[in-house]
């Protein structure tokens, strides 16, 4: 009997030991899976995943922990597909969480902080009225308090203001509003639109914002929406040269150019302002087709002969030859040059071809288009068939920031010259504001004796909430710390409040030179995306969207630079 008892006890102990050992290994393996996967991702769609960025004040628990990946997004080494995961081994590669909005360090002085908070309040005022009167529409008419849609959006209701303003809401820490917009995009944004819309505007506003929000949050809904949009944009590139058309029907894929554009040409600023977005889209999806399209566009442009080293604004997509020899750093040309510089920055300074093309173009612009007026104002003139127009558009006022960014990111013998140009152009754009009664800048201004930095025609005197001058204030402040740029920015905030703010939002003006200017009753989507974002960042610390880690697209949507942990590239296959 004692023998049987001893055997039973011994057997029981063996069973307990086996269970404990097995449990140890199972627990260790299961624990690794929990850390890696976060538990049952298959039970929720990407659109239903909670985004920790929505936590009030960005007090995100476990913000340094890995964000879970779904099975379909996880890379598996093909060499280990036939074997079970090892019980021990290297820990899973951490996946970055959302971008955390931290308090300014060092803290802002009281005046700067009050000004920054005022700009956030302006954003809240404009957003709340859009929600109240035009939710889901493209834009708001703040006086008549109804929806509005510009021709660039065709006949569609794409919620342009929601999409365009979303990363600004995130950066300002307006988390409830961000979640409100995010949910609308997840549930309602559909790109199956049977209407002609602008490829360029769709790219910088919609694609740019979706990519920015993916980088900031890691929410794969944004990435997937961007990929869906990218697929629908591809047919515009189906031309003899691969140069895309300006207009596309996202439902049928049919595309064409504007009839007014130099006998059916494509436009330089439009075809050259897709490189940042399509390169990043390829990198985060693993689909190289998007990047290949924009690389081909650059190849065509690089191989063309440039008159005086300059790029004309028009190019035929069938022949690959230049149209009218009209050169501009304003409308039709502007962001092509910006994206050459920023493609190099975005690549972690590895895209040497882009920087070389930028440098060569800027040398030619400096030689042929940068001029000084009799009143000692520096400006960049349009050039038509070798004839200077001695006129500068508001759209060209971004150039001060561009020249400065180019000079500071690659020091050489021309850097001082380009910083001088940057300061001069930014000062001239400020003068165009200061010489109007409203202290807001006109759409275009001229340089003739006795009338410099002022509009001459009624059709040039309007202000439609444009951001370009404030963009240069922001970049110049970040790179020089000259306090005048903040003061100029605050002058603009006060002018916007006095002349553009109405109970239903913010409106543009028909004539900036009048004491009581008529208002245009349109709150532009880019007022959220660009104007208020640049002003808010002007009064923020350098760590909030650090220029060493982020680059702005032409609509001020923030895209990560390679090397930034939030670049979030697709796993290699």
Image (cartoon, rainbow, N blue to C red):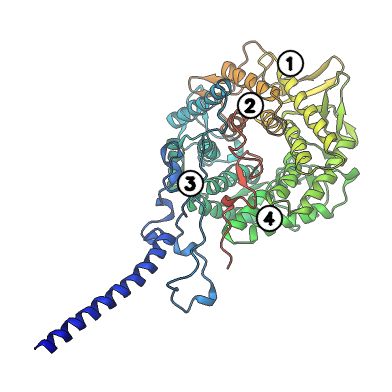
Label located before the other in sequence (2 or 1): 1
Q: Which residue is mark 4?
A: 237
| Residue 438 point in image, percent of width and height | 65, 15
Badge 4: few (under 14), some or many (20 or more) residues near its Cα, within 10 Å? many
The residue drawn where x is 8% and y is 88% is 1
Q: Which residue is mark 1?
A: 435
Q: Find numbered disc 2 in the image and state the secondary structure of the residue it sits on.
A: loop
Mark 1 → mark 3, Cα distance in angstroms: 43 Å
Q: Find numbered disc 3 in the image and state the secondary structure of the residue it sits on.
A: loop
The residue drawn where x is 85% and y is 46% is 360
Residue 254 seen by the camera: no
The residue drawn where x is 46% and y is 27% is 129
Q: Find numbered disc 1 in the image and state the secondary structure of the residue it sits on.
A: loop
Residue 545 seen by the camera: yes
Quadrant occupied by the C terminus: bottom right
Label 2 vs label 1, nearer the camera = 1
Label located before the other in sequence (3 or 4): 3
- Depth order, front residue of 552/257: 552
- Depth order, front residue of 139/240: 139
Label located before the other in sequence (2 or 4): 4
Label located before the other in sequence (3 or 2): 3
Mark 3 → mark 2, Cα distance in angstroms: 26 Å
Assess whether mark 4 and mark 1 are in contact (beta carbons under 8 angstroms).
no
**388 sits left or right of 199 in the view:** right
| Residue 372 point in image, percent of width and height | 87, 25
Q: Find numbered disc 4 in the image and state the secondary structure of the residue it sits on.
A: helix
| Residue 285 point in image, percent of width and height | 57, 59
Q: Which residue is mark 3?
A: 189
Q: Residue furthest front?
A: 2
Q: Which residue is mark 2?
A: 464
**102 sits left or right of 12 in the view:** right
């Amino acid at each position: 009997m004692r023998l049987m008892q001893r055997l039973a006890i011994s057997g029981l102990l063996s069973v307990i030991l086996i269970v404990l050992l097995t449990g140890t290994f199972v627990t260790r393996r299961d624990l690794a899976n929990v850390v890696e996967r976060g538990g049952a991702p298959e039970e929720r769609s990407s659109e239903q995943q909670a985004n920790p960025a929505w936590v009030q004040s960005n007090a995100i628990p476990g913000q340094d922990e890995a964000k879970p990946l779904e099975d379909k997004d996880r890379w598996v080494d093909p060499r280990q597909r036939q074997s079970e995961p090892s019980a021990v081994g290297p820990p899973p590669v951490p996946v970055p969480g959302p971008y955390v909005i931290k308090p300014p360090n060092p803290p802002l002085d009281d005046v700067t902080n009050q000004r920054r908070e005022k700009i956030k309040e302006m954003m809240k005022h404009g957003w709340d009225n859009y929600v109240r009167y035009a939710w889901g529409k493209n834009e708001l008419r703040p006086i008549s308090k109804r929806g509005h849609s510009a021709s660039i959006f065709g006949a569609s209701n794409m919620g342009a203001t929601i999409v365009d303003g979303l990363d600004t809401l995130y950066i300002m820490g307006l988390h409830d509003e961000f979640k409100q917009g995010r949910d609308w995009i997840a549930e309602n944004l559909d790109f199956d639109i049977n209407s002609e819309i602008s490829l360029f505007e769709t790219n910088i506003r919609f694609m740019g914002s979706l990519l920015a929000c993916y980088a900031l949050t890691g929410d794969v809904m944004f990435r997937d929406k961007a990929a869906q949009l990218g697929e629908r944009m591809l047919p515009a590139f189906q031309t003899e040269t691969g140069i895309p058309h300006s207009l596309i029907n996202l439902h049928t894929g049919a595309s064409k150019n504007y009839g007014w554009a130099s006998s059916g040409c494509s436009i330089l600023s439009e075809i050259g302002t897709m490189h940042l977005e399509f390169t990043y889209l390829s990198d985060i999806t693993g689909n190289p087709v998007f990047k290949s399209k924009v690389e081909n566009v650059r190849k065509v442009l690089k191989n063309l002969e440039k008159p005086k080293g300059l790029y004309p604004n028009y190019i035929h997509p069938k022949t690959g030859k230049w149209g009218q020899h009209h050169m501009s750093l304003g409308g039709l040309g502007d962001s092509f040059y910006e994206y050459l510089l920023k493609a190099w920055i975005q690549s972690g300074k590895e895209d040497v071809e882009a920087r070389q093309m930028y440098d060569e173009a800027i040398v030619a612009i400096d030689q042929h288009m940068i001029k000084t007026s009799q009143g000692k104002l520096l400006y960049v003139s349009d050039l038509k068939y070798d004839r200077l127009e001695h006129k500068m558009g508001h759209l060209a006022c971004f150039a001060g920031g561009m020249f400065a960014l180019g000079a500071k990111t690659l020091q050489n013998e021309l850097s001082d010259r380009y910083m001088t140009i940057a300061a001069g152009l930014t000062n001239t754009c400020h003068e165009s504001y200061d010489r109007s009664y409203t202290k807001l800048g006109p759409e275009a201004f001229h340089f003739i004796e006795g009338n410099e930095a002022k509009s001459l025609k009624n059709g040039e005197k309007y202000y439609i909430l444009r951001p370009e001058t404030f963009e240069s204030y922001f970049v110049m402040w970040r790179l020089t710390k000259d306090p005048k740029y903040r003061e100029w920015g605050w002058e603009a905030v006060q002018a916007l409040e006095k002349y553009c703010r109405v109970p239903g939002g913010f409106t543009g003006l028909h004539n900036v030179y009048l004491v009581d200017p008529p208002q245009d009753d349109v709150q532009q989507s880019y007022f959220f995306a660009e104007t208020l974002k640049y002003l808010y960042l002007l009064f923020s610390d350098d760590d909030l969207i650090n220029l060493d880690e982020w680059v702005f697209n032409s609509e001020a949507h923030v895209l990560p630079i390679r090397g930034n942990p939030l670049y979030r590239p697709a796993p290699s296959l």
